[in-house]
Amino acid sequence: MKLKDQRILITGGAGFLGSWVVQKIMELGIPQKNIFVPRSYIYDLRKFDDCKMVVKRADVVIHLAARVGGIGYNREHPGELFYDNAMIGIQLMEAARLAGVKKFVGVATICSYPKFTPIPFKEESIWDGYPEETNAPYGLAKKMLLVQAQAYRQQYGFNAITLFPVNLYGPGDNFNPESSHVIPALIKKFVEAKEQKQNQVEVWGTGKATREFLFVKDAAEGIVLAAEKYDKPEPVNIGSGMEISIYDLVLMIAELVGFRGEIIWDSSKPDGQPRRCLDVSRAQKEFGFKANTDFKNGLEETVSWYIHNRR
């Protein structure tokens, strides 16, 4: 599919990932008038009538909108995270089908994988167990995109694909401590500790858990490539294929920020899923996606963006 010839709806297009996806699509030469980004203060996508309104002129839907947060936020809002994400995804895809949308790109989450998944996570393992408990309501709600996409393809011939991106980071991330993920939360914590001349910083968990991270600009490229070139029912991982412990991540961010004090590990707080690292071979094979940003370089850019833009 040539996106250049289509009218594209991008839910969540004003958010962290969405704004980079919009930019990447505009680089293809698509006029801004052919890109529609519904705003949450106008359209409540938990309501079916609003879903029907936003899709009625779309040829392609890229569904990025989500209610999302870090471990603490997930523990405090499990019901809202399940309901909001499930209702938005289910109703939006149904509205798109009824409106005759040509293609639906559902963007799910690595949180959908089982808590104990063999490393690297292969797409075939997605149903081999229950997600990590703090992520389960959010992860299961987003995994319904895959179930619905495959069911709609089977019954209606609806061209829906499902992508599973890993944890993202980069310029424009959410640095609100109430809902941020690990990298922006740590950057904010260490920058403030350095400025306030604190002698120590406390971080959650033991540091033993591992994570994989993908620079947001790379993620946007992967999503746009899939929207253009991938049309199969099987889910696809979108990641970098690298794995780093939270311990090493904390030390790297402290070094980049210039914090020289003591780091205190609060082991009473949860680590979350023990390990995360994706098999990214399917994305490269099917639509030529490979992450290009060096992790430390991406972190440096993110730290610099936060320091210069936080106010």
Image (cartoon, rainbow, N blue to C red):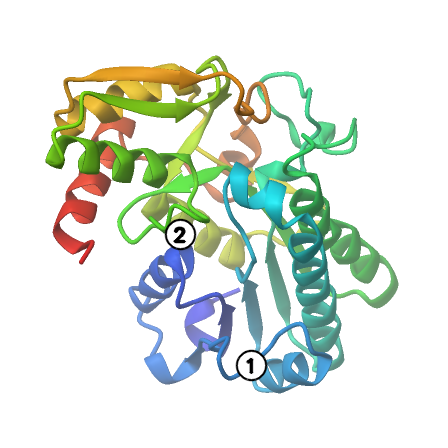
Task: Tell me the number on the disc at residue 10.
Answer: none
Few, some or many C-alpha atoms within 10 Å of disc 2 (few <14, some 14-19, many ≥20)? many
Mark 2 or mark 1: which comes first in sequence?
A: 1
User: In what element is the residue under mark 2?
Assistant: helix
Query: Which label lies toward us, 2 or 1?
Result: 1
SS for callout 1 = loop
- Image quarter of residue 130: top right
Residue 62 place in picture, x, y as percent:
54, 64
Instruction: Name the residue rendered at 72%, 79% in the picture.
Output: 48
Q: Position of residue 208 (x, y in %)?
A: 48, 12
Amino acid type, residue under disc 2 in the picture: Ala
- Image coords of residue 267 (percent x, y): 50, 16
- The quadrant the C terminus occupies is bottom left
In the picture, the disc for residue 43 is 1
Which residue sits at x=59%, y=47%?
163
Q: Which mark is residue 220?
A: 2
Asked whether, in this view, residue 180 is left or right of residue 113, the answer is left
Q: Is residue 238 above or below residue 52?
A: above
